[in-house]
Image: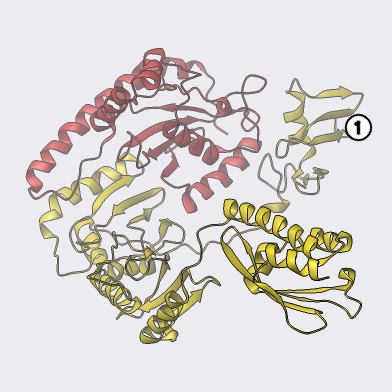
Amino acid sequence: MQRASRLKRELHLLTTEPPPGITCWQNEGHLDYLRAQILGSSDTPYEKGVFDLEVVVPVRYPFEPPKIRFLTPIYHPNIDSSGRICLDVLRLPPKGAWRPSLNIATLLTSIQMLMNEPNPDDPLMADISSEYKYNKQAFLRNARQWTEKYASQTTMASENPDEENHQSEASQVKGSNASQKRKGSNMSGFSKKPCSKT
Amino acid sequence: MAAGFGSLLRECPLLLPQNREKSVYEGFVTAQGKDFHIRILLPVDLQLKNARIQCSLQLKKVLSGYQQILKQRLQHSSDLVSFMVELKTVLEAALKNTREFQSPALPPPQHYSGLIRDIETLGWNKVVFVDPTFTTIKLKAEDSCGRHHQITLKLNPKYPTEPPDCLVDLPVQFTVLVDTQSSLLSIHRQFLAALESLKAFWNALDEIDEKTWVLEPEKPTRSATMRRIAVGNNVSINVEVDPRHPTMPPECFFLGPDHVVNPLKMKLNSNIHMWDPEASLLQNLKEVLEIDFPSREALHKSDFSMDCGICYAYRLHGAIPDQVCDDSRCGQPFHQACLYEWLRGLPSSRQSYNVIFGECPYCNKQITLKMSLKKS
């Protein structure tokens, strides 16, 4: 009940006043399954990357936080290889800091901030975390490489449009492969949950 | 008295009586190799208690904050000599302290007269702001398209041999070129020239700001090269315009669902050869993407402050938000059912009969919720 009225208002706000560098929209025909994109901030290794995320809104939302996961692979100490994010506002108290005064827009903004400022003291990926702490150069190089490989939208401003076209198609194929694989591996997890359409 | 005068001469050789009654002394008191002009007026009975001391502006400045001490010394000194000794001690201490805290001395008067002449050459009508110490000057300029711009100059004491630091709102680096001496006029001219060179860039962005729905930045500054333009529902395009080549294809990112974004990307790639550097940026984007940009949606900023902070609605099954956070700075309203649902799940809340004590989800302050029995 509360979920429906909240989502209606939130989706309207996300359309008319999206947070900087963030888009979020409703997947056709699904009330509880949203998609989002975060544009990597400049001066971070995620610059110029467009990162896809899925937002699953539980029935008890906003008493429970939405489940947010990266679909685009990202090299980050607090985000694991299946896109799960280690962030306190995504979990219920007492362990987490979710509260109904937050919403999807503020969560996505928090995730964008986590991308800018990783928290290596609460790691999900131990290797990346120690690399971030002790070998920042290597971390930045790897993160940039992943961004280029999986999240870049090479579209534009090339002298030779044909060549560009080719390249971007190639990278798109790669990217969608990766995200499909991920979706596949997680589909089973989602289908178990009751999918209520109200 | 003669002996007193002798010792005064020894202590302050530059301080001399100005009349036969020795009620007026004038001259200089020396401390740390510096002479300060001073004048001492004694009453008829030559009692120091009622003496008046006149100081030069400089001395006054150094001694400001020590007036109380000096007054006290004046009361306790038996004669002028002993007071002068005290005054010198205080002055030495004051000078030492000011030296530690004070920034380098102000530039000579010529600096300021030169600066005033400089401003007069430029014209006062171009000056928007000058701070009291004449170290920050703001000038205005208008480009040939009627846009207003400002430049802030931070002058250092070595001006005009050293150019001032310039703060501008431009998308490109602005450095002042100096031949031998900088003048405000030449800086202003260089600023105008820089503005002219960016005219095409601002024309392009002004058109976008005016005719499309720019999602961010909310209030673009003149230096902002990025625009996120709404294309349709939840679809937007991020363009990064090169200020030096505003009519060339900008760097673009698309945000939104694949089924809308992918066709746009493809159009961009296949139509890029149609990009016409003679046409405007917006026109080109429209042609190449084969779309019309929607204009800004009339945002009826409805007043959310009455709605429930949890379900974001006003009416929930007919109920209206009747619980309000008691903290006056918060005052967030909630439906009783929503607040109950949130608080009951929290380990930090506790319930006593039909009252729940917990924390406001907005401000964390204590909130008490009385459940009306008929509802449950």
Give residue A147's position: percent from left, percent from top: 28, 31
Quarter-of-image position of residue B170: bottom left
- Find chain B in the image and tell me its colour: yellow
Q: Nearer the viewer, residue B125 or B217?
A: B125
Left or right of B53? Residue B159 is left
Quarter holding the N terminus of chain B is bottom right
Q: Residues within 10 Å of mark 1 (few under 14, many from 20)?
A: few
Left or right of B155? Residue A179 is left
Q: Residue at x 78, y 44 (%)?
A: B319
Q: Nearer the viewer, residue B336 or B237?
A: B237
Give residue A37's position: percent from left, percent from top: 39, 38
- Find chain A in the image and tell me its colour: red
Dot 1 amino acid type: Leu
Q: Residue at x 60, y 39 (%)?
A: A4
According to the picture, the residue beneath numbered tag 1 turns out to be B373
Q: Nearer the viewer, residue A44 or B173?
A: B173
Residue A1 showing in the rendered view: no
